[in-house]
């Protein structure tokens, strides 16, 4: 492949690079209180450490649409913190209690922080489907606005940023120069 073709190939690859989406549904976790109130899971090279007072895995069976295992805190009101070993650019989870338990409408506050602990995104409101935050995220905190209500986490997802286009172009250039020799 000549250098021009290699650069075009690199540009196409860089333009089509997508970020991976990771999903923890907590099914593989044992039901019960989590020892030390912390749990670290890993996917695609990123450690995610969940922590909360009374952190636990619960079984939400048929009465909650067959949700299965979910993550919750003591009394389900939070806060639940998730810390990432490297930056991610999107975080989301499903609150399976909302609208399924006596028509409960949960109001959740969520905050996302960068590596320097600066607030990069937040939300406050009903989480009828998925609670989503975006930005250069290293830590998120979720808490029920109404202490008398509660929320649980299922289908926790995050997106790892795609490799930069410049890095891929640089790799293409190196490959082209190596090929010439």
Image (tube, rainbow, N blue to C red):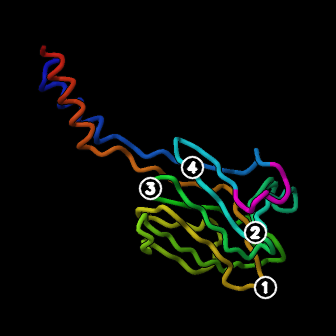
- Where residue 101 sits in the image (x, y, percent)? 82, 72
Question: What's drawn in magenta, residue-wise?
Answer: 30-38
Q: Are marks 4 and 2 in contact (CB under 8 Å)?
A: no
Compared to residue 121, the image places residue 11 above or below, namely above
Q: Nearer the viewer, mark 1 or mark 4?
A: 4
- What label does residue 148 carry, if any? 1
Report helix, strand or loop for mark 1.
loop
> Mark 1 packing: few (<14 Cα in 10 Å), some, or many (20+)?
few
In the image, is 110 to the left or to the right of 161? right
Q: Quadrant of residue 131?
A: bottom right
Residue drawn at 26 percent across, 40 percent down: 167
Kindly report the distance in space between the C-alpha atoms of the residues bearing marks 4 and 2: 20 Å
Residue beneath the point at 75% across and 60% down: 36
Q: Which residue is mark 3?
A: 87
**Image: 135 above or below 9:** below
In this rendering, the label closer to the viewer, 2 or 1? 2
Q: Secondary structure at mark 2?
A: loop
| Residue beneath disc 2 | 73
Using the image as rendered, state which of residue 32 and residue 97 is in the foreground. 32
Helix, strand or loop under label 4: strand
Classify mark 3: residues with Cα within 10 Å, few (<14), some (14-19) or many (20+).
some
* Mark seen at residue 12: none
Residue 75 rendering spot, x and y as whole percentages: 81, 75
Q: CA distance from mark 3 to mark 2?
A: 24 Å
Residue at label 4? 47
Residue 60 appears anywhere in the view: no
């Amino acid at each position: 492949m000549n250098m021009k073709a290699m650069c075009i190939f690199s540009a196409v690859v860089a333009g089509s690079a997508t970020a991976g989406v990771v999903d923890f549904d907590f099914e593989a976790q044992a039901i019960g209180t989590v020892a030390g109130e912390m749990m670290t899971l890993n996917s695609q090279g990123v450690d995610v450490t969940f922590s909360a007072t009374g952190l636990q895995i619960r079984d939400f069976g048929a009465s909650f649409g067959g949700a299965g295992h979910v993550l919750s805190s003591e009394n389900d009101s939070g806060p639940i913190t998730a810390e990432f070993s490297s930056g991610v650019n999107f975080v989301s989870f499903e609150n399976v209690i909302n609208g399924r338990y006596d028509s409960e409408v949960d109001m959740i506050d969520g905050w996302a922080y960068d590596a320097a602990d600066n607030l990069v995104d937040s939300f406050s409101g009903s989480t009828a489907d998925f609670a989503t935050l975006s930005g250069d995220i290293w830590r998120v905190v979720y808490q029920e606005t109404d202490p008398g209500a509660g929320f649980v986490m299922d289908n926790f997802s995050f997106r790892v940023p795609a490799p930069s286009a410049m890095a891929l172009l640089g790799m293409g250039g190196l490959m082209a120069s190596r090929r010439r020799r």
